[in-house]
């Protein structure tokens, strides 16, 4: 592996014009494809195998033309103080709004609140519902504009009017200002770490190119593959973070190789062979984690994971090829580690040290002993007190993880929107006028095709539901034209995200088992609320198999990388600790409201259903990045003859500063998404940022060296039979060392021949 990448790096350095041209051409091609591609909406939200999805599919068959999955819009009216919606002037405003909405091209139906009973008991609140023939996210902009305009015109008459429903849902906006701030922080960290604007600009440039190719490709294929805006947001988030980090590790290793006295082409080759090997395996763990989301069998998650994994692959390829090419263009402007601007070593040209090899750097260091950096001092401290550091780190993260035991899952709705939005105000008005459960109606589908008396079966279902707890309203059954399928609407007494509503869904389903036994009719519960409940349950059921698959595959991969059993095991256990602590922090902020005001959390509630499995996938991949980059340098020192304790210090000397910088950059990138107005994106940004902090600075920087110090040589133990069976990927660059020794010996023979001559 190291030898192949060494040759690839040198080739890219020499053929820099060709490499740069290829990547610019790919970026241009992806950009043109994105610009010319037809507009796409979002991934169809389907969950194969769950009851709510089966009911939706049945409705499309038995009620053709009803647009069961079509978008809905609601305009909610509230009369001024002392008036009622039934007053003549207010009634006329509502009826005019209904007529205006009915003229829309995508509108299937518009309800009149005065004929459908959609007026509150006290007469102060009324609403009209609009049904569309396309899903909410796929509606034309003109359709959304017409809905909002109708609300504005009604509001102008003096009524309180707000608009809700999924028809107003737009693509997730990732908080542009926050992302700019995140990139600015990343730039500052890169300048401090790499010592120059040119060196700092290389990772930013390559990351932007990689993300541009990845996101543009997703946009170009969005219509054909039914990809949503959230897919692009995830790819942007992950692609920026890993793209900067991977390039940073190679540039940093290149500067270290220059400090060893090697010429620039050789330094590029060795940096790509060593740090590049770590990049490949770190990227593989991220790809495994993201692509593994397919095992959940939710199409939306599968597409998000595969798209983000593709962006990571692009980031790896760019780091291995374009960074060496750009280093060739940069020349002397990227200096060796520790070299100051204007020093004589910088003026010796690109062939400095060509014949001196590593010896020049070694002599320089022996002549002037460098002062230990903070990474070396910290590693030395951990080695002296490993048990105390380990205990403090584990107990601290364990305490932060405690709130995760109270985790409540759900999906965001209009009730989780900021109070400044019209969707949230419409949600609150409906709750005020009709009860909290009105925003989450349940649709009961009675499949009576195998029943002798369909109407009697529907009546049995209706009567049974009325006797259940937490039921506010049950509408009469409505049959299709064939008379074999009926729908019943149930309004719960509690809000959609409450445990009472979830209990009601399960109670109706339990009752349906008895109905089927007695009448032959099948009872299915669906609707947005029931779909959310089924989605949460499906994700919960898939979490353990997914965790086993991802951790198992990565464990095997890390055994190959580190040639050890205990090091990969320690890496996996450390990841579990950091992800549990991150989930605990998410619960404390978004569910309990602790310090929520600092990041703009206006409404607490259940944690997004996909958050646990999503964090397991993404955080695991990112956590293994730091594990690979930090521990491979320790492994490299150990293989080259250092004691276990010395190897830990050496690993920190060369990698701690860069790993810390990479973590800060990743936190800045993820933290930029916290400014998003979309609650899902805000939660993902916070969860990933805090998880990176816990994993990089507590697990990898404290717990990992403490465990390695306690284990000593046992940490690197591997059964001989397994050592023989595993392929030798040579992440440590041992093959490069052998190659250098051979070159040195050959040069010595040539010199002796010249002397004899």
Image: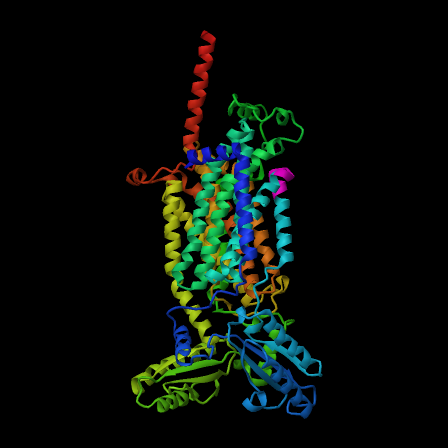
| 456 relative to 647, above or below | below
The residue lying furthest to the left in this view is 721
Considering depth in this image, is 152 or 465 the residue closer to the camera?
A: 152
Question: Residue 197, position in %: x, y?
Answer: 65, 39
Describe the colour scheme in one phrase: rainbow
Q: Main secondary structure of the magenta part?
A: helix
Question: Residue 27, position in %: x, y?
Answer: 55, 48
Considering depth in this image, is 55 or 30 the residue closer to the camera?
A: 30
The quarter of the image holding the N terminus is top left
Question: Residue 448, position in %: x, y?
Answer: 34, 85
Whether residue 378 is visible here, answered yes or no, is: no
Horizontal relation, residue 245 to residue 450: left or right = right
Horizontal relation, residue 545 to residue 634: left or right = left
Q: Which segment is the magenta one? A: 190-198
| 449 relative to 633, above or below | below
The residue lying furthest to the top in this view is 757
Question: Residue 34, position in %: x, y?
Answer: 54, 55
| 485 relative to 147, above or below | below
Considering depth in this image, is 528 or 695 the residue closer to the camera?
A: 528
Q: Which quadrant would residue 733 be assigned to in this image?
A: top left
- Asked if the magenta segment contains residue 672, the reply would be no
Q: Which residue does the image show at 71% across and 83% down from the upper left? A: 158
Q: Which quadrant would residue 193 be assigned to in this image?
A: top right
Q: Which quadrant would residue 736 be assigned to in this image?
A: top left
Give the total of numbered labels: 0
Whether residue 661 is visible here, answered yes or no, is: yes
């Amino acid at each position: 592996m190291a030898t192949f990448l060494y040759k690839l790096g040198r080739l890219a350095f020499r053929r820099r014009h060709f490499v740069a041209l290829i990547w610019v051409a790919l970026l241009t091609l992806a950009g043109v494809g994105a610009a010319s591609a037809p507009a796409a909406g979002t991934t169809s939200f389907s969950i194969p195998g769950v009851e709510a999805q089966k009911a939706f599919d049945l409705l499309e068959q038995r009620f053709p033309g009803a647009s069961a999955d079509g978008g809905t819009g609601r305009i909610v009216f509230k009369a001024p103080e002392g008036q009622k919606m039934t007053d003549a002037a207010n009634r006329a405003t509502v009826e005019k709004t209904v007529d205006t909405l009915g003229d829309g091209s995508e509108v299937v139906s518009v309800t009149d609140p005065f004929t459908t009973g959609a007026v509150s008991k006290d007469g102060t609140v009324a609403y009209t519902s609009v049904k569309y023939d396309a899903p909410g996210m796929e509606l034309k902009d003109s359709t959304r504009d017409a809905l909002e305009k109708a609300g504005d015109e009604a509001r102008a008459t003096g009524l309180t009017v707000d608009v809700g429903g999924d028809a107003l849902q737009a693509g997730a906006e990732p908080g542009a200002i926050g992302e700019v701030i995140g990139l600015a922080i990343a730039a500052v960290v890169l300048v401090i770490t790499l010592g120059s604007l040119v060196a700092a600009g290389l990772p930013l440039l390559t990351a932007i190119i990689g993300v541009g190719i990845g996101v543009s490709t997703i946009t170009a294929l969005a219509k054909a593959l039914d990809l949503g805006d959230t897919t692009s947001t995830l790819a942007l988030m992950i692609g920026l973070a890993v793209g900067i980090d991977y390039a940073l590790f190679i540039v940093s290793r290149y500067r270290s190789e220059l400090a060893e006295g090697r010429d620039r082409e050789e330094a590029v080759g060795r940096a790509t062979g060593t740090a590049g090997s770590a990049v490949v395996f770190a990227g593989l763990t991220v790809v495994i984690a993201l692509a593994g989301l397919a095992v959940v069998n939710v199409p939306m998650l599968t597409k998000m994971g595969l798209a983000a994994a593709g962006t990571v692959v692009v980031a790896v390829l760019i780091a291995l090829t374009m960074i060496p090419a750009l280093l060739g263009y940069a020349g002397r402007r990227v200096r060796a580690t520790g070299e100051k601007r204007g020093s004589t070593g910088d003026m010796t040209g690109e062939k400095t040290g060509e014949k001196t090899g590593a010896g020049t750097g070694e002599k320089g260091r022996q002549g002037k002993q460098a002062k230990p950096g903070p990474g070396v001092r910290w590693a030395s401290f951990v080695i002296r007190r490993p048990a105390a550091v380990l205990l403090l780190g584990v107990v601290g993260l364990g305490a932060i993880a405690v709130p995760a035991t109270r985790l409540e899952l759900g999906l965001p709705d209009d009730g989780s929107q900021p109070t400044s939005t019209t969707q949230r105000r419409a949600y609150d008005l409906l709750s005020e006028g009709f009860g909290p459960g009105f925003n989450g109606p349940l649709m009961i589908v009675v499949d009576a095709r195998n029943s002798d008396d369909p109407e009697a079966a529907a009546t049995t279902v209706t009567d049974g539901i009325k006797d259940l707890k937490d039921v506010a309203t049950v509408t009469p059954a409505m049959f299709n034209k064939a008379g074999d399928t009926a729908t019943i609407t149930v309004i719960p007494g509690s809000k959609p995200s409450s445990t009472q509503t979830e209990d009601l869904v399960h109670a109706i389903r339990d009752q349906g088992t008895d109905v089927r036994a007695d009448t032959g009719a099948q009872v299915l519960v669906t609707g947005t609320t029931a779909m959310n409940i089924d989605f949460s349950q499906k994700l919960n059921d898939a979490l353990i198999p997914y965790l086993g698959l991802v951790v198992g595959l990565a464990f095997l991969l890390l055994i190959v990388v580190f040639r050890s059993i205990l090091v990969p095991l320690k890496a996996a256990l450390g990841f579990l600790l950091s992800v549990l602590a991150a989930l605990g922090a998410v619960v404390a902020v978004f569910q309990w409201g602790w310090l929520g005001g600092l990041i703009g959390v206006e409404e607490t509630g259940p944690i997004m259903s996909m958050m646990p499995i999503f964090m397991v996938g993404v955080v695991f991949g990112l956590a293994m990045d730091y594990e690979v980059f930090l521990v491979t340098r320790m492994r490299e020192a150990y293989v080259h003859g250092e004691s276990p304790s010395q190897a830990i210090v050496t690993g920190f000397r060369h990698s701690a500063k860069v790993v810390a910088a990479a973590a800060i950059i990743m936190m800045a990138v993820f933290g930029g998404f916290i400014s998003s107005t979309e609650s899902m994106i805000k939660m993902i940004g916070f969860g990933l940022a805090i998880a990176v902090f816990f994993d990089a600075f507590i697990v990898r920087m404290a717990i990992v060296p403490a465990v390695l110090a306690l284990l000593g040589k046992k940490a690197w133990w591997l059964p001989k039979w397994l050592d023989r069976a595993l392929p030798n990927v040579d992440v440590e660059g041992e093959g490069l060392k052998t190659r250098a020794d051979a070159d040195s010996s050959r040069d010595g023979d040539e010199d002796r021949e010249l002397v004899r001559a």
